[in-house]
Structures are given as C-alpha cells and as structure tokens.
Image (cartoon, rainbow, N blue to C red):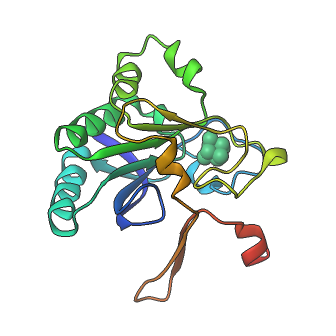
Amino acid sequence: MIVNIHKILYHTTAEGFGHRACIWLQGCSRHCKGCMARDTWNPEDGCQMDTESILQRIFLEAQIRGLEGVTFLGGEPFEQPKPLSEMICRIKKEGLSVIVFTGYTFEQLQQTEDEAVLACLSQIDLLIDGAYIEELREFERPWVGSSNQRYLFLTDRYSENDIQKERNRMEIRISKDGKITVNGMADFQKIFHI
Ligand code: SF4
C-alpha cells in the first residue's frame, strides 16, 4: 500500500519510550496556529513510499538495534488511515509498541465510521491527542507541545508511571552534505531564535 511520507528515522531515542523508529506522515489540514511543522501540511509534498518496504526496514532495525517500537507523527497521521492501520497492525504483530500523535481528540476519532481509524484505535498503545494550542504551549511534560494534549493509554503496555520517568530530548543530525536536521521536543524558538 502506498503512503505519503514526510520523513522517517529508523532509530531515535527522542520520540517516545526507548529506542524507536519514527514516521512522519505528510499532510495535515488542521493548520494549528504556531505549528512548527508547516512543511508537513501540503499533501502534494512528501515522498510516496510502499508500506511493505518501510515495514521490512523497521523489522530489520528492530533485530539489529532492539527497537522498542514505532512512533507515528505528522502532519496528521489519521489523514491516511488505511496505510496507517496496515502498518500499525503489522508492527503490533511483531511485538513492537505503537505511539501515535494526533491533532484530533480521541472522542472525535471514536465517532468516525472509518474502519481503518477504528482498527488503529484498537491497536495503539499510547495515543497523544489534541490540537496544538499556541497559548497553552508547554515543555514540562515529555513530547507534548501544549497543555491540553493528553496521554491516553489504550492498552496496558504503558502507564502514567512510565511517563513520569521520561523527559524531553532533542537530537541534532548533520548529514555528509552538511544538512542539519533536528527532532525531539524542546523550546526550539528559544534555542534557535526563530
Ligand atoms: S495537527 Fe500537528 S502538524 Fe497539523 S497543524 Fe496541528 S501541530 Fe501542525
């Protein structure tokens, strides 16, 4: 199945519990004020990839590096529910955990009749939900951007106790051609004066 991808990191320790792969899906129609990921908005951008090739690479990395799981970010992951659902289902079958960030609330997602969305909700271990609200910006809790966003434990794999042990991290990568990329969660406006 084809999925439109903004970026993939096959190994990170800044996007959820433990060592993980992280997939940013391209496309978000929500357009939250103050969003720091505007380059993920346009569904015409991004890279069309085959879910099978992504999954095979993740499973290989899981063997080599002992990945704990996979985190899905956006963009808005639920704007591509079918490939999202397929990937989550396969990842869970391999025993890896799944974290998903969404701008929708859990209740909004539950109200849909889209079977792929409902299949995702039945498999996700940790859902971090809610729109980014600039006026509620916060960096105290790990990974979230604003205080309205919630940690919802949809399986018993993780709990609030696990969250208490975590803190925000930032990773900076410099490629061979000198390109610098940053991921994780921190007060980027303060650090980079943007
Ligand atoms: S849902 Fe996320 S990616 Fe989309 S506009 Fe809001 S903060 Fe940005």
Residue under the point 50% across and 46% down:
161
Residue 185 point in image, percent of width and height:
60, 62
Between 7 and 161, which is closer to the camera in this rendering? 161
Left/right placement of residue 164 relative to residue 56 reads: right
Residue under the point 24% across and 43% down:
91
Query: As drawn, which residue projects farthest toward the front?
Result: 161
Between 125 and 90, which is closer to the camera in this rendering? 125
Quadrant the C terminus occupies? bottom right
Q: Please say if 56 is above or below 177.
A: above
Q: Please say if 15 is above or below 147.
A: below
Quadrant the N terminus occupies? top left
Residue under the point 32% across and 31% down:
85
Q: Please say if 108 is above or below 92.
A: above
Left/right placement of residue 42 relative to residue 33 reads: left
**For residue 33, which quarter of the picture?**
top right
Residue under the point 72% across and 37% down:
148
**For residue 80, which quarter of the picture?**
top left
Left/right placement of residue 139 relative to residue 91 reads: right
Q: Please say if 59 is above or below 108.
A: below
Residue 121 point in image, percent of width and height:
40, 26
- Quadrant of the picture in which ligand 1 is shown: top right
Is residue 137 among the parts visible in the rendering? Answer: yes
Query: As drawn, which residue projects farthest toward the right?
Result: 135
Between 96 and 29, which is closer to the camera in this rendering? 96
Is residue 44 among the parts visible in the rendering? Answer: no
Q: How many marks?
A: 0
Between 90 and 151, which is closer to the camera in this rendering? 151
Residue 52 point in image, percent of width and height:
19, 46
